């Protein structure tokens, strides 16, 4: 398993815990060499040795002098100490992680607890330990403690009664180990669907929050949030959820991203509603709306996190390049592809490069998915997300987190530029008229010769921008496919000229999409209650595609009048 997976994988809770040990102070309290030890559910890791040096003007400098994993791309970026608050920023494989700890009032105290993470929903408890070591032994840097072994055994047990027994034993034997936080959340998740477990759940939660508080308010808030969400998703103890979600909100500082705070408030509002406290839920709406606006502004300012330079279009229209992306709102590796896709939309004119984004239920339920996006993925035999195609031909290597987005964007630029000079094999005249809630779409295809036998005219209806704060932190989704009017088989081309029309009833389309999501939700829960189905700012695309080879030969677009 890679180091990033070691740090960021929580087998049960999809998170990780990090622990750093910090020993007795010298004359200049934080100065010296410190060992950073990471505790996660499956193993312990001596990540690195950090040397801290006092500089002038009460400033500090940190340097990574040894790594538990050889050749690990890890450096110290910044260290600040304000009052009793220590903040150390580490760059790990291009990602910035922050260690935040509170120094004790008495210098003689030799353990300093804190948190480590990139964002509030991925926080890890930490301890830094003063040491005389100058090197770390790679053979001993990764190890499995008795608590790790007990947790792995418990969560790997299929029988829930036996799993509960093993988790209770773990908590008795290793109650002060941070693994106890993992174990508690998992045990509460199992107990929450059983009648008569309220007292045990409350006792477990109290112990876990007391342990988490040792590492600071942010980790206590994180644990409270996870407990609250586990209870909210239960069948027997939903009434307990608001208490822990309220506590979580009170513990996270205003410095936490607005998107995360909005997410917490929305979860609390849902908890109020299901526990019969509708007035409290309604009272949160103004706060949620304000946080959402702030989060939208933060997102638009920071994404994409690299410069985009528009390309001048050709004087004479050429063959359109069609970029299709299959993605998912619960797909973390789709982030780089999504952001690169959006940047392409800012680079080329809409008629030069036509964008189509299809959502799939990969890895989990996605409210932007519909039967047509699924059928289109079957046509292309898509095996996973993200998958991108240019003019019907698959590309590769576009996945990854946000920091890979610029690299993926540059890859797409090269691929697209190779197609831009091609001449169109036909002319497409596309017209769209809107009358009340109906769209009348008509395409005339002409000027073609020797078209493939399986060349077909297809129509695609997209929404140019959908606002949906997704679990993978993409807030705005572009060129989202809502329907393929006229069907996936398309319309055959006539001998010299083809004219074809279709009509779309937007009211019926919205109803069909909502009915589909509701049916799907009965089998597989969505991450939230949102169904983003405004169906506004629409665009129609006409494709000429060879269904035999899947190659897209040409395309045109027309915006729907608002």
Image (cartoon, rainbow, N blue to C red):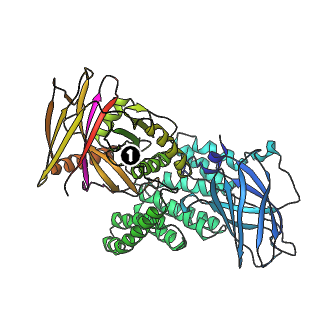
What's the magenta region? 531-547
Residue in the foreground of this view, choosing between 225 and 417: 417
**Magenta region includes residue 388:** no
Q: Where in the figure is residue 389, as x and y percent of width and height?
A: 41, 35
- Give the side of residue 240 with respect to residue 218, left or right: left
| Above or below, comparing residue 379 to residue 146 in the picture | above
Residue in the foreground of this view, choosing between 14 and 374: 374
**Magenta region includes residue 546:** yes
Residue that label 1 marks: 365
Q: Would you call the spot at circle 1 few (<14 residues within 10 Å), some (14-19), or many (20 or more)?
A: many
Is residue 385 in sight in this rendering? no
Quadrant of residue 278 within the rendered picture: bottom left
| Label 1 SS | loop
Residue at the (49%, 46%) spot, across then down = 409
Q: Quadrant of the N terminus?
A: top right
| Above or below, comparing residue 218 to residue 155 in the picture | below
Q: Where in the figure is residue 489, as x and y percent of width and height?
A: 23, 29
Residue in the foreground of this view, choosing between 319 and 271: 319
- Give the side of residue 285 with respect to residue 514, left or right: right
- Give the side of residue 52 with respect to residue 391, left or right: right
Residue in the foreground of this view, choosing between 51 and 343: 343
Q: Where in the figure is residue 225, as x and y percent of width and height?
A: 50, 63
Q: Which residue lies furthest to the left in this view?
A: 435
């Amino acid at each position: 398993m890679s180091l990033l997976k070691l740090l960021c994988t929580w087998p049960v809770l999809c998170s990780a815990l990090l622990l750093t040990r910090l020993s007795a102070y010298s004359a200049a309290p934080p100065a010296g060499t410190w060992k950073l030890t990471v505790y996660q559910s499956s193993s312990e890791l001596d990540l690195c040795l950090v040397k801290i040096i006092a500089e002038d003007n009460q400033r500090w400098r940190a340097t990574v002098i040894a790594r538990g994993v050889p050749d690990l791309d890890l450096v110290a970026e910044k260290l600040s100490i304000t009052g009793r608050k220590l903040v150390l920023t580490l760059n790990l494989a291009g990602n910035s992680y922050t260690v935040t700890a509170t120094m004790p009032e008495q210098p003689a105290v030799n353990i300093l607890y804190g948190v480590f993470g990139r964002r509030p929903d991925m926080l890890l408890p930490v301890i830094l330990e003063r040491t005389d070591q100058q090197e770390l032994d790679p053979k001993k840097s990764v190890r499995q403690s008795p608590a790790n072994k007990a947790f792995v055994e418990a969560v790997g047990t299929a029988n829930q009664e036996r799993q509960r027994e093993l988790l209770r034993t773990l908590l008795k034997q290793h109650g002060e180990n941070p693994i106890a936080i993992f174990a508690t959340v998992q045990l509460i998740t199992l107990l929450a669907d059983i009648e008569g477990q309220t007292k045990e759940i409350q006792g477990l939660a109290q112990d876990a929050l007391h342990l988490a508080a040792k590492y600071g308010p942010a980790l206590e808030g994180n644990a409270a949030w996870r407990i609250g969400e586990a209870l909210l998703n239960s069948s027997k103890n939903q009434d307990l959820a608001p208490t822990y979600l309220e506590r979580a909100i009170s513990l996270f500082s205003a410095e936490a991203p607005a998107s995360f705070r909005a997410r917490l408030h929305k979860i609390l509002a849902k908890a109020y509603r299901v526990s019969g406290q509708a007035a409290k839920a309604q009272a949160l709406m103004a706060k949620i709306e304000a946080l959402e606006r702030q989060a939208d502004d933060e997102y638009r300012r920071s994404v994409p996190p690299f410069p985009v330079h528009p390309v001048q279009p050709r004087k004479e229209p050429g063959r359109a390049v069609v970029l299709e992306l299959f993605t998912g709102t619960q797909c973390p590796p789709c982030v780089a592809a999504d952001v690169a896709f959006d940047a392409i939309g800012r680079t080329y004119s809409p008629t030069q490069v036509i964008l189509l984004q299809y959502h799939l239920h990969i890895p989990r339920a996605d409210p932007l998915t519909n039967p047509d996006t699924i059928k289109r993925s079957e046509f292309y035999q898509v095996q996973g997300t993200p998958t991108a195609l240019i003019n019907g031909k698959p590309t590769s290597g576009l996945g990854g987190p946000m920091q890979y987005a610029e690299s993926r964007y540059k890859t797409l630029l090269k691929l697209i530029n190779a197609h831009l000079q091609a001449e169109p094999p036909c002319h497409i005249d596309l017209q769209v008229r809107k009358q009340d809630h109906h769209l009348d779409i008509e395409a005339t295809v002409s000027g073609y010769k020797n078209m493939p036998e399986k060349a077909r005219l297809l129509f695609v209806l997209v929404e140019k921008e959908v606002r949906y704060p997704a679990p993978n932190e993409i807030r705005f989704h572009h060129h989202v496919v809502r329907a393929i009017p006229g069907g996936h088989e398309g319309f055959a081309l006539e001998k010299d000229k083809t004219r074809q029309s279709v009509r779309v009833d937007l009211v019926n389309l919205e109803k069909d999409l909502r009915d589909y999501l509701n049916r799907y939700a009965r089998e597989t829960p969505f991450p939230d209650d949102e169904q983003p189905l405004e169906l506004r700012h629409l665009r129609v695309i006409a494709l000429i595609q060879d269904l035999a080879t899947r190659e897209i030969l040409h395309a045109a677009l027309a915006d729907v009048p608002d």
